[in-house]
Image: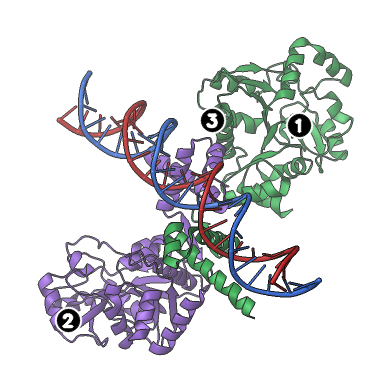
Chain colours: A purple, B green, C blue, D red
Amino acid sequence: MAKRTEAAGRLDDAARAGWLYYVAGRTQDEIASAMGISRQSAQRLVSLAVAERLIKVRLDHPIAECLELAERLKQRFDLVQVDVVPSDPGSSSTTVGIAEAGAAEIERWLKKPEPIVLAVGTGRTLKAAIDQLPAMECPQHRIMSLTGNIGPDGSAAYYNVIFSMADAVKARHFPMPLPVLVSSAQERDLLHQQSLVQSTLKLGREADVAFVGIGELGPDAPLCEDGFLGRDEMAKLMDEGAAGEICGWMFDRDGRLLKGSINERVASVPLPSRDSTAVIGLAKGKRKYPAIHAALKGRMINGLITDEAAAKHLLST
Amino acid sequence: MAKRTEAAGRLDDAARAGWLYYVAGRTQDEIASAMGISRQSAQRLVSLAVAERLIKVRLDHPIAECLELAERLKQRFDLVQVDVVPSDPGSSSTTVGIAEAGAAEIERWLKKPEPIVLAVGTGRTLKAAIDQLPAMECPQHRIMSLTGNIGPDGSAAYYNVIFSMADAVKARHFPMPLPVLVSSAQERDLLHQQSLVQSTLKLGREADVAFVGIGELGPDAPLCEDGFLGRDEMAKLMDEGAAGEICGWMFDRDGRLLKGSINERVASVPLPSRDSTAVIGLAKGKRKYPAIHAALKGRMINGLITDEAAAKHLLST
DNA sequence: AAGATGGGTGAGTAAATGCCCGAGAGCAAG
DNA sequence: CTTGCTCTCGGGCATTTACTCACCCATCTT
């Protein structure tokens, strides 16, 4: 109890220091003397504010080249919404940049006064985007999870997105209290009969917008790393021509859902249709190129948030 | 035309550099080599991006608004120190929040190793702030009272602040062994001749910082409640245009000391000058808005500790 | 009670950043 | 072609920031 108050006080100080540093443009020395602490402490508070994501930076300028790439992607793949962020050549992160851009796009939707249903998938990229969301008050909207949020070991899944999102934006939320993969098609159908799941499934069909990560497949794919899929199953999938997945739905290099196979056992909500819903994929990174390309080719998504390098690659194919 | 494209290209580069710096977190050296320019050029682009407001930083924490308000108050009323604490809409207390903030500010001053002279006024708000002070050892400082600490009935005044403060922080203290109001200007002058009082008056002129409450006037004002001022005198004051008081000094709505009237009989130390002393007022609460505004307008104080609601009101006038 | 543990602090220092200034390119007028 | 002007660039340097290290103190463990 006392501990929490203490920690909150420290975060308060961190926020103060961060504000003085980034917004007011003071030096850490000035902050230190203003707050009556040593310069080192001020520095620590500033970096704490950054680490705790109290400080959010956004670039508010259309970079011509990114805009052009976005426009061409839109034309080429018949998309309604494309965001291309600059690439950072030196970084191998798969989230830096598109997380911020994704958060900005999500925020745009959430700012609408009329109630919407916003669907989210899961994955590291999406989680990073959610972490960039500012605190908001959106009681008018409903957000729902397209994928189960129970991990392979029964725990809440690592990159469970919907709870952190609901927490940040204060909207009603509808998780999928299921694993991502179940043991058989029969089990899935049975589980989907549950009334809780039924209402979430229904909501999925009503979604106005869906944000999904695009996952690559392969022996090093997150799905394997996190234990959702055995290496043998992954190998089998690859043999069947799988090129990527969205919310657990496996598709081949032309973006067609694989018949049978793992997909029989995916407990996720069916991807909303492009016709009624804005389905926006987030992905960047070389390893994901085939998956992104397939998803676009198969028209599984009609919106994309990616980076320059990926955009260039997609246009060059 | 060519010029505009050129300038736009430069902004593009600035945006790119700013993005790499703030979002991707690279150093200017890395940006420079990534973009094939010198580090200095990269630095220029980054600072251009900031100057052109391409980079938007925001603080995602409840106190962000308070800091923003504080900054605006500083600008608007030419103050050196402003602290805005969150308002508690449910509470009508006139001290909750600013007492803690006031104590924190006092503590900052007392922590200085070099000796200072700290002046205090009186009042419920200041008393509440003092009560929040931790025990300290400050033999190097001197604290003095700006106002008399003898009540209208000859007893020690209720909200006498200096003794409890001296008790808490173990500093040498210089009270004003006088009533707040005496019977005439002559009597005041006579009392001020006393050597004890003389030394306190002298100390007042040397004060490095003064903490004062800002009092509202009116039939229900504390000054009446506590019997310092009769209702008839208060009514007369109001007729003369009095809007508030600090340490007993009455001022009108423009923050000008009233000539004659009660002020002739105020035995307090003259308020230290803004030029040499940080004069920090503490006040919040709807009833005090006119008084605070007047004190700011008349430049009687150059520091303020208040709450969000009052800050907003002051900025809206 | 003694010792481990974890978070926080200040000193010191290396790295990164901001800024001034002289050099050189480009350009218009003479 | 020269002169004078502006503009931008990069070198050098002072300031500011990040990081490491030793240390302190409260809490927890054995």
- Residue B250: x percent and y percent? 80, 33
Q: Is residue B273 left or right of residue A78?
A: right
| Residue A144, image quadrant | bottom left
| Residue B157, image quadrant | top right
Secondary element at tag 2: helix
Of the 4 image quadrants, the one containing the N terminus of chain B is: bottom right
Residue density around tag 3, few if under 14, some if 14–19, many if 20 or more, within 10 Å: some
Q: Nearer the viewer, residue B207 or A153?
A: B207
Secondary element at tag 1: loop
- Residue A277: x percent and y percent? 40, 83
Decide if residue A173 is in sight here. Answer: yes
> Mark number for residue B25?
none
Amino acid type of the residue tagged 1 in the rendering: Ser
Q: Nearer the viewer, residue A123 or A34?
A: A34
Marks 2 and 3 on same chain: no
> Mark number for residue B132?
3
Disc 3 vs disc 1: which is toward the camera?
1
- Residue A137: x percent and y percent? 48, 63
Secondary element at tag 3: loop
Amino acid type of the residue tagged 2 in the rendering: Glu
Residue drawn at 40 percent across, 89 percent down: A76
Decide if residue A134 is in sight here. Answer: no
Residue drawn at 34 percent across, 62 percent down: A163
Q: Nearer the viewer, residue A126 or B134?
A: A126
Q: CB of mark 2 within 8 Å of CB of mark 3?
A: no
> Mark number for residue B273?
1
